[in-house]
Image (cartoon, helix red, strand yellow):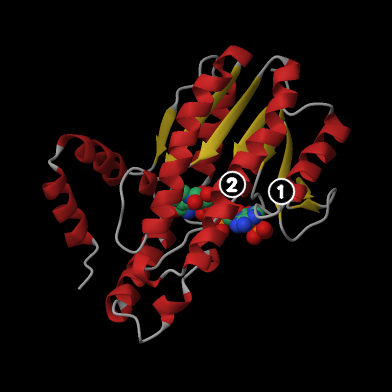
């Protein structure tokens, strides 16, 4: 098996760490990133670079560092990110901008930094970690859903743009996985205040969202899926990782009338 040079953003915890450790166990050369390390640090067996999705300079510096060590990047896994939970009405324009800037503009910047080197090498793969929440809006997760939906559209467009360069682009849509995301999730200032119209409902929902994640699946499963994509000669555009309910929800969203589907979601995630 040919050893690939893989860069996994956001590898200090959760899904990114699980992907990195699985690929290392399969003898690939893996670099991970975190905002809290220096280039060259080793964290839990993973060679790290310092990358902040809100800082384009740090993205280019990370890619340059890996190129200086390995001479190439075969696979980019865009995983870094966290959740944002709160009513859209309660999320200030500054909070929306900061989130979408780091999560969407940051991801596009990672692709822009890696693509020319993949093209020069004549091959490459980009794997974007999306979410089931990118398939439809959910109450109190509108901004998160918007970021992931946009990521899906970027993935679709980029896949066509990069096909002539022999670079494949895929997305993975995880359901609930047990990671650090409950601790790292961003909550708009106003959602925490009793002044919010949604205060009581949000509190209940937040507990539900967090408990679903804490009993979520083992992120190592996503490591296995990423490995499968790396091994694949013709990776698909979309992969789903998650339990039956998550896969079913994607299917129901395509076949049910939207009024029925929204009723089902509102029953599961009540706003009142
Ligand atoms: N867990 C789930 O159920 C689930 C479901 C669907 C999709 N996802 C997606 O999976 C990805 C990973 O989430 P996770 O559940 O593994 O969460 P996690 O355990 O909190 O890990 C998040 C990782 O991303 C990094 N990160 C977060 N914000 C960043 C930023 N602004 N700039 C640079 N790095 C940043 C963190 O690194 P540092 O804090 O060390 O910098 C950390 O390594 C996210 O894109 C998330 O949306 C997760």
Q: Would you place residue 272 above or below residue 84 in this image? A: below
Quadrant of the rendering where the N terminus is positioned: top right
Looking at marks 2 and 1 on the same chain, the residue that comes earlier in the sequence is marked by 1
Q: Is residue 14 visible?
A: no
Residue name at image x 43 percent, y 68 percent: 91
Measured Cα–Cα span from mark 2 to mark 1:
9 Å
Crowding at label 2, few (<14), some or many (≥20) Cα neighbours within 10 Å? Answer: some
Name the quadrant where ligand 1 sits: bottom right
The quadrant in which the C terminus is found is: bottom left
Is residue 235 rendered to the left or right of residue 55?
left
- The quadrant in which residue 191 appears is bottom left
Question: Would you call the spot at circle 1 few (<14 residues within 10 Å), some (14-19), or many (20 or more)?
Answer: some
From this view, report whether residue 56 is shown above or below residue 89. Answer: above
- Residue at (43% x, 55% y) in the render: 144
Residue under pointer 2 = 105
**Residue 106 drawn at (x, y percent):** 62, 47
The residue at which mark 1 appears reads as 56
Say which residue appears at 34% left-offset and 42% top-offset: 135
Q: Is residue 220 left or right of residue 197?
A: right
Q: For residue 98, what is the image quadrant?
A: bottom right
Of residues 149 and 239, the one drawn nearer to the viewer in this rendering: 149
Depth order, front residue of 149/82: 149
Farthest residue, direction bottom: 194
Q: Answer yes or no: do the residues labelled 2 and 1 have beta carbons within 8 Å?
A: yes
Left or right: where does residue 249 sit relative to residue 57?
A: left
Position of residue 87 measured from the top left corner of the image (x, y, whole percent): 35, 68
Secondary structure beneath label 2: helix
Q: Seen in the image, is 113 located left or right of residue 181?
A: right
Q: Is residue 100 visible?
A: yes
């Amino acid at each position: 098996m040919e050893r690939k040079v893989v860069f996994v953003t956001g590898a200090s915890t959760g899904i990114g760490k699980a992907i990195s450790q699985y690929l290392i166990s399969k003898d690939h050369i893996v670099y991970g990133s975190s905002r809290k390390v220096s280039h060259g640090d080793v964290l839990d067996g993973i060679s790290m670079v310092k990358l902040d999705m809100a800082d384009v300079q740090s993205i280019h510096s990370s890619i340059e560092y890996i190129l200086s060590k390995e001479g190439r990047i075969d696979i980019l896994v865009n995983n870094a990110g966290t959740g944002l939970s709160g009513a859209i009405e309660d999320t200030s324009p500054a909070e929306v901008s900061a989130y979408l800037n780091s999560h969407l503009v940051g991801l596009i910047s990672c692709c822009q930094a890696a693509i020319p080197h993949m093209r020069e090498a004549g091959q490459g793969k980009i794997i974007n970690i999306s979410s089931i929440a990118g398939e439809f809006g959910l109450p109190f997760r509108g901004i998160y859903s918007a970021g992931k939906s946009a990521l899906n559209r970027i993935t679709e467009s980029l896949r066509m743009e990069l096909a002539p360069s022999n670079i494949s682009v895929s997305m993975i849509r995880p359901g609930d996985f047990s990671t650090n995301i409950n601790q790292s999730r961003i909550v708009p200032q106003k959602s925490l205040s009793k002044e919010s119209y949604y205060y009581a409902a949000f509190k209940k929902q937040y507990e539900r969202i967090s408990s679903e994640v804490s009993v979520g699946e083992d992120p190592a499963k996503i490591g296995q899926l990423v490995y499968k994509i790396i091994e694949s000669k013709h990776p698909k555009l979309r992969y789903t990782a998650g339990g039956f309910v998550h896969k079913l929800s994607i299917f129901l969203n395509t076949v049910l009338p939207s009024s029925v589907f929204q009723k089902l979601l509102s029953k599961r995630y009540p706003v009142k």
